[in-house]
Every structure is written in C-alpha cells, then in structure tokens.
Image (cartoon, helix red, strand yellow):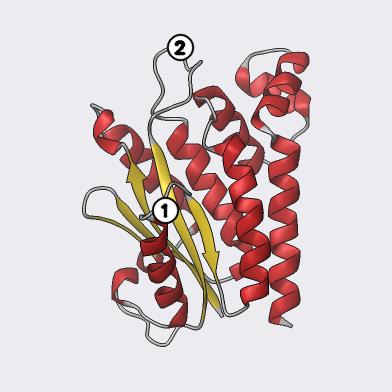
Amino acid sequence: MVAVITADLVNSRSIADQGVWIHALEELLGKKNRPGHWEIFRGDSLQLLIEKPERALMEAVKIKSLIKSTGAGKSGKRSTSLDIRMAIGIGDMAYTGAKVTESNGSAFVNAGEQFEELRKGKIKMALRSPWPELDREMNLYFRLAGVIMDNWTSISAKTIHEVLKHPDDKQQDLAKRFGINQNAVSNRLKRAGADEIRELIHRFERRVKEHML
C-alpha cells in the first residue's frame, strides 16, 4: 500500500519568476525522496509517490505551505495568489517505472480520478482511498481546513512550513529563526491555525494506520 499525490499549480502564470517556486519545490522534494518518486511535468504539474500512506497529508501540507509562501506581494501581508491543487490517492502499486509518471496501480488511479474531480470545483485538496468511510471523514476535514490554508498569507505559510520541517522546535527556536520575539511567533501560529493543522495531520496518520491493519 502506497500513497500518490497528483497536483497542479493554481495561478502559476501570476508569478513572473517561475524559477522561484520550481527551485524551492525541487529542493524540498529532492531532500527526502528518491529521484524516481517525484516529478514536475508540463511546467506546473506534480506527481509524488509516498511509501508510507499515513505520511501523505504531512507531505501535502508541506508542499502547500511552501508554494503559498512564494507567491505573495512584497509585503507578504495579503493571501498569495499562487496555490496548489492536490489529490491524495491511496492504494496498491502494480508497476514501478523509471519515472513516477510511468508507474501505475490503484493508488495512481485513485489520485488521478480524484484530481479530475478537484479540477471541476473550488476544493484544493481531497483523498480517495480503498475506504469510502475514511474518504468521507477526511474530505470533510480537508474542506474545513481549506478555509484556513487557502487564505494563508506568505508569512503564515512560511511559519507553518518551518513548524512542519522542525516539529521538535520550541517557540523560542522559531523566534530565533525568524528574528522576532516569542509573542510574535505565538501570534503567527494562531493566525496560521498551526495547532488545528497539526491535529488534523495526526488524525489522518492514525486513521490511515487503523485502516491498514
């Protein structure tokens, strides 16, 4: 059982320098994933294979927070126009190709079919797995979380990204990294919905593991 994220950028043409998000995304994906497990194609599309399905939402939120941190105005005080639409598919892997886009199996089918559904509406994240009950539960949570995540400012997105990259850091550590005081970090975390996002990620991990037993 594996997970696959199929995604594309939203409003990518609004960014003059495409290299900003492409290089940042390549660095993020290249650090922890084997070359054949991810690919950026057609200029603004992405496919990522995740060997541990319970990690899929964590990786998806990392990607979303990275993308949204790159596309705001100079002040970073408004929500960024650059965003990403992601379908998470869970299932089997029947064939492993040299490139992830050449591999197939039910995980790829689930991600692809769910992605086509996403393109028809305004929802930017959804799950399709072998377990319809899990899909209904998680997709409700994703829609609610989207109210927060889709409206992250660049600063909020950067804050969430750092929290997920360094889960053991305290607020004091984040304050040093950002060059601000601890109260400012606390306010940023609240505005970004950090506690709620982390709780959702942990629930996703637990529920997927339960279904895989």
The residue that label 1 is drawn on is 30
Q: Residue at x 36, y 55 (%)?
A: 119
- Observer able to see residue 167: no
Q: Classify the position of the N terminus by image quarter.
A: bottom right
Relative side of 102 to 51, left or right = left
Asked which secondary structure carries label 1, the reply is helix
Q: Position of residue 104 (x, y in %)?
A: 36, 80
The residue that label 2 is drawn on is 75
Relative side of 145 to 157, left or right = right
Q: Position of residue 59 (x, y in %)?
A: 55, 54
Residue in front for this viewpoint, 195 or 55 = 195
Amino acid under label 1? Gly
Q: Given contact means CB atoms under 8 Å apart, are the residues at marks 2 and 1 in contact?
A: no
Q: Classify the position of the C terminus by image quarter.
A: bottom right
Asked which secondary structure carries label 2, the reply is loop
Relative side of 210 to 120, left or right = right
Classify residue 98 by image quadrant: bottom left
Task: Please tell me whether residue 94 is drawn above or below residue 119 in the rendered image.
Answer: below
| Mark 1 residue crowding within 10 angstroms, few (<14) / some (14–19) / many (20+) | some
Nearest to the eye among marks 2 and 1: give it.
2
Q: Extreme front residue here?
A: 121
